[in-house]
Amino acid sequence: MGVGVLSPGKINAHWAHPFGCSPTQLTALPTLSRNRAMERVLELLRVPCPNAGCSETFAFAETSTHVKHCPFTQPTCPFTSCDFTCSFKDLYEHCGYAKHCEDSYMFECGTPVFIHPVSGKRVILKEQTTDEGEGEVVVVECFDTPQGRLFHACCIGPGTAKFSYDLHMYSSSGDSCLFQSKLKRVREVSNEPPCKHVMLVHSSMCPNYKFYICIKQETY
């Protein structure tokens, strides 16, 4: 088997092109050209939202962005034992049904709430609001890892309001740990541990602890 050799002023063609094509053969290959007329048509094309109940239309290129933030997109209920799907508009009300009300917490922005997150079970918090069906739904997740326990919070659904949160843990030994982060909005809650914006707590603090979350609305 031959071996390509590099020498000054000369490059073996099979070394430079692993598929065995010489520079002359490569230039003979067909090239793709942009269809600018079709691109222009797609730019001008307006399409309806695929979600039932939404009457908005938008540019074809904006489809994925709209669906991501559309209040009529159908997310799955964040409770682990429930596979019910509904629109973002109905999610707040669904989480308050008798089936879930005992497993969820109410929160007001700026007020700490005691929660007890455990691995494999999500903590659901509903915003205390006077506007029926208009509050935020926040999910706190907990994952056991070889390095310790991961805690993470996110907000389900679209919206223009921005939030941050504090997680404050107190162990039975008197140690404490504070984590602060922005509250990211998501379409659905994943069962996979996130790779960033997480609180990692050493296993020695995990058996007995008190846990508080304080959600704050950003005003700037």
Image (cartoon, rainbow, N blue to C red):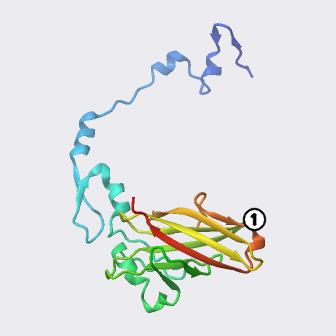
Q: Is residue 21 left or right of residue 95?
A: right
Q: Is residue 190 visible?
A: no
Residue type indicated by callout 1: Pro
Residue 176 coordinates in the image, percent (x, y) = 70, 71
Residue 49 coordinates in the image, percent (x, y) = 27, 62
Q: Residue at x 53, y 17 (%)?
A: 23
Residue 13 coordinates in the image, percent (x, y) = 61, 17
**Residue hosting label 1:** 146
Q: Is residue 173 left or right of residue 170?
A: right
Q: Is residue 174 visible?
A: yes
Q: Is residue 46 left or right of residue 147?
A: left
Look at the picture and state if 111 lies above or below 202.
below
Look at the picture and state if 91 lies above or below 158.
below
Q: Quadrant of the N terminus?
A: top right
Q: Residue at x 49, y 77 (%)?
A: 111
Q: Residue at x 73, y 20 (%)?
A: 3
Element under disc 1: loop
Q: Residue at x 21, y 45 (%)?
A: 44
User: For this rendering, which residue is in front, 14 or 205?
Assistant: 205
Q: Is residue 206 left or right of residue 159?
A: right
User: For this rendering, which residue is in front, 20 or 161?
Assistant: 161
